Image (cartoon, rainbow, N blue to C red):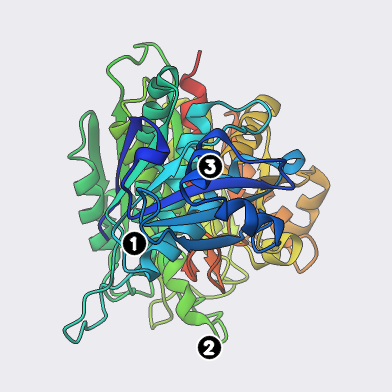
Amino acid sequence: MKIIHVEGQVGRAESEAAEVLVLLRCEGASGLTQEAAAIDAQLGGQLTKLIKRGEFEGKLGEGLLVHTQGKAKATRLFLAGLGKEKDLRLDAFRQALGSAVKRVRQAKVTSFTVVMPDTLPHETSVLDVAQALVEGAILGNYQFTAYRSTNGTKPIDVERLTLYTSQRAHLPQMTEGIRRGVATAEATVLVRDLCNHPSNVMTPTRIVREAQAVAKESGVRLKVLEQKDMEKLGMGALLGVARGSHEPPKFIILEYKGAKAKKTEQPVVLVGKTITFDTGGISLKPAENMEHMKADMTGGAEVLATMRAAARLKLPLHLISILPVAENMPGGRAMKPGDIVTTLSGKTVEVQNTDAEGRLILSDGLAYATRYKPAVLIDIATLTGACVVALGQFAVGMFGNDEQAKEQVRNAGLRAGERVWEMPLWEEYFEQLRSDVADMRNIGGRGGGMITAALFLSKFVGDCPWIHLDIASTDWSERERAYLPKGPTGIGTRLLIQFLINRTLP
């Protein structure tokens, strides 16, 4: 889809001849902001009357479109609610703009203007709010129409957003917030697109082509290991998962070094589970909702998009993204329950369930990642149904062996509106993974399934500071919300990018 063009301007909102002018308001706020009051004067007090009558209260997600009937410079006003000021957080601005852009599109309008708010959440800046507003607008405008016949009618796309501030001193921060917001939202849109394409299109070979496109960004290099390379290295887990498919597996390594990165700096390494379709293999999944498994590559799509965003933002760091890519299919050569595979690390795994394939391909991806001696190693994966049971749809499961890294990820999640919740990584759970015939088995029974999966991965990271993010709870939405579409959400992408941005701040 076409990304909204965003720009920042200094001026008076009441002088802006916008098609739609968005005014943000907290629930229970006393009086009008300076900008809203000036427009209210043009309208003869209409806004004040609407608020007094309770037609608009400012609740989070609430919106009201008002036609100015030629009394103001703007053709229409959209009042967007932020919720109560005491509960105000950055995500309220994303939600407000996600709702606003949909209403703008319904009105068949292609551009709109937003007045920067006076009220900021605690410990945030104009930059943070501008970034959140831009993210909400771009992500709320998302539509996937690649396979729809138009029948002569083209869907309306909002093309332009202007952020207005009356304070010239705020313009540099607002401009940087716009730059970051566009890059992070573009990355999330890329993830949604990749995961929306069906698996007969988005094959492992196509993933390589997408990586080649990212490698055209300044400072990015690409290396692709083919099946024969994996065989030489001994990636028995990844090769085992891919054995039942006619699609050859791929192992993709992207590397970026910012121009201002320190030469001696250890890299941040990201590893993303990239199963382009997961049938479960011989341990076949139920047919219901199996079509969602085209998005089992979300983790890989997110580390790919994060690499592109880091390059476009010119972040001063060293970053490596690794994508072990395969399709998990049944077939005459498919891996079977009871098979034993030898991983890149040399550890052996008894495969008791071929539908626990994500941890297998990640075991080889993580072992390969340790060769770079990373400053921090993060894997992200749609790993377990148990994560959905434990956390529902509003939190990403987090595990890790490094307190500082966990705190950094937690803070990035709060800022990005993609919150994480830490789960225990206690060695006692490994009892469930003990095998009679190999070093370990790939499942540990029903109890603590998210934990045993993470503990399995922990055996392949060595002494590296490591974080595991299970996004099975958040990668797919069953309904449309403010800036989240029905289907693939891309949640986790902005979390990773914000984590990297935060690492580069003084």
Residue labelled with disc 1? 194
Label number found at residue 69 = none
N-terminal-most mark, 2 or 3:
3
| Secondary structure category for the residue under label 3 | helix
What residue lies at 52% left-to-right and 64% top-to-bottom? 357
Q: CA distance from mark 2 to mark 3?
A: 54 Å
Specify the quadrant of the image occupied by residue 14. top left
Between marks 1 and 3 in the image, the one whose residue lies nearer the viewer:
3
Numbered badge on residue 36:
3
Q: Secondary structure at mark 2?
A: loop
Amino acid carrying mark 1 in the image: Leu
- Label 2 Cα neighbours within 10 Å, binned few <14 / some 14-19 / many ≥20: few
Could you tell me which secondary element the residue under label 1 belongs to? helix
Check disc 2 and report the residue beneath it. 287
Task: Please identify, in this view, whether the residue under mark 2 or under mark 3 is nearer the observer.
Answer: 3
Q: Residues within 10 Å of mark 1 (few under 14, many from 20)?
A: many
Give above or below for 47 relative to 460. Answer: below
Q: Determine contact: label 1, label 3, CB under 8 Å.
A: no
Q: CA distance from mark 1 to mark 3?
A: 41 Å
From where the camera sits, is residue 462 visible? yes
